[in-house]
Image (cartoon, grey):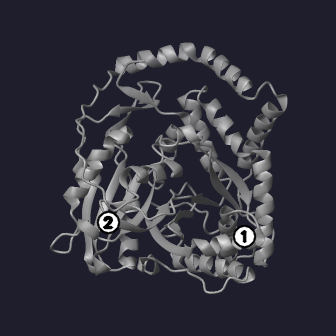
Amino acid sequence: MSAGYERLSAQDSSFLVFEDPNTHMHLGGIAIFDPGPLATADGGVDIERIRRHVESRLHWIPRYRQRVAYVPLERHPVWVDDDHFNLSYHVRHTSLPRPGDEEQLKRLAGRIMSQRLDRRRPLWEIWIVEGLEGGRFAMVTKTHHCMVDGVAAVDLNAVLLSPTPEHPQEEAPPWEPRPTPAPLALLRDEALRQVRRPLDLVRWLGNAVQRSDLDPSRLLERATAAWETIGAGLRGAARTPLNQPIGPHRRFDWLTLDLGEVKGVKERFGGTVNDVVLATVAGAVRRFLRHRQLSLEGMDFRIVVPVSVRSEDERGRFTNRASGWIMSLPIQERDPRRRLSKVRTTTKRLKESNQASGVEVLTQLAEWVGSAAVSLGTRFASRMAPYNLIVTNIPGPQLPLYMLGARLRAGYPTVPLFENQGLGVATFSYAGQLCWGFNADWDLVPDLNEFVHAIEDSFRELAEAAGIGDLGAARGPAAAGAE
């Protein structure tokens, strides 16, 4: 291989294929900070200090100074260094009319999320938003899904944030972009790769057998999981008002729950925090669709639950290592305890069947079939729409974090909307809070606040059933701001 570039994996490149003018494949979130030592004399935020800080950390995340290029003819994407990299373009500064409130910040976040990332540049942006009440500021982040998954995005926070307020400014090490490879060099390397492909496939199959310790049952399990994944993808999901063609514009909203109370529900009824999240979503979908006057009888409302297959030695690598479950939510069930019980039964079966390995197998096989087939398969999967909603639960640190001494109060994640998917739900646990982020199509979900209230009411049902009293639900980080 010629020096100066890296090839995108089939999974990473699929997110480039998914994207179109209405379907933006960036993820990210909104983080809210106390001003701390970043406050300026006029009540603003020291943006130049933040830019210097980001620049000093970029050597840990080299992908953030690379852009996408393509192999001629074959058109497979590769990463090359951006020889015109401009940090000020990526770290942006804006303000709300003072004193800005959370509703204004949500509308601004929706507008930012409505704009596609420029493919001619590294595929990320950070917006520093000053002007919030109390001198607080927000950081709105956008990173293309071809660069990171949810776990990698949390690892990125570990690069920019610190567990202690004391964090001296570091100098950025020198950086020299590698020369961009010539088109003929890319074409030559791709031709050599095609020649080696059969041998590489034999080697991969041999390693797979060795990893399975020659156990036919494990090989059969992975093959069965792949087949179940294909079968689930061939069944179209229920038609709902949330699953119509989307436009380019977004709404964003959030909610904060007390993580201790979520864990209290889990301890009372069993299961995991993720089970409680999914049961809460099931109850909220039930309420929301009934509010829209839809009949739930016979409706198979299916969700995708991203599952990380990242091993411990892969932590810190900024790429996609995610698989997923496709599961039906028990939205017909009225009783919150039985909803949680049914969710627990389903997730237990999915874990035991190792369904998540099916996507991993198919992703690995996609590496051998060529870019044209990956593109065709990605578009076919998008058209099939085998699910109604994405629900992702990202575990985060339970200790306070700081950026140059400014304390992070809350972080609300966002997932991209795929074709015919008008709503996405993401949660992030941080410092005793469960932070919910809701990304929605502007026109399909004008009543997004009703869904957020439905989430709150659904969890209240579970908490009351578990005998948990005074709930710590809040629409934002205001309650979390008290020491």
In the rendered image, residue 48, in percent from the top left (x then y), is placed at 19, 57
The residue located at (29%, 63%) in the rendering is 128
Q: Quadrant where the C terminus lies?
A: bottom left
Q: Quadrant of residue 196?
A: top right
Mark 2 element type: strand
Query: Looking at the image, which is closer to me, 84 or 231?
Result: 84
Outermost residue, right direction?
Answer: 217
Say whether marks 2 and 1 touch (CB < 8 Å). Answer: no
Res 332 seen here: no
Q: Residue 267 has which mark?
A: 1
Find disc 2 in the rendering and name its residue: 406
Left or right: residue 10 versus residue 142 is: right
The quadrant in which residue 209 appears is: top right
Vertical arrangement, residue 163 with respect to residue 135, above or below: above
The residue nearer to you, when weighing 261 against 216, is 261
Q: CA distance from mark 2 to mark 1?
A: 34 Å
The three-letter code of the residue at mark 2 reads Ala
Residue 246 versus residue 195 in the image, above or below: below
Q: Is residue 468 above or below residue 24?
A: below
Asked if one can make out residue 155 in the rendered structure from this viewpoint, the answer is yes
Label number found at residue 370: none
The quarter of the picture where the N terminus appears is top left
Q: Find the residue positioned furthest to the bottom.
A: 470
N-terminal-most mark, 2 or 1: 1
Under tag 1, what secondary structure?
Answer: helix
Residue type at mark 1?
Glu
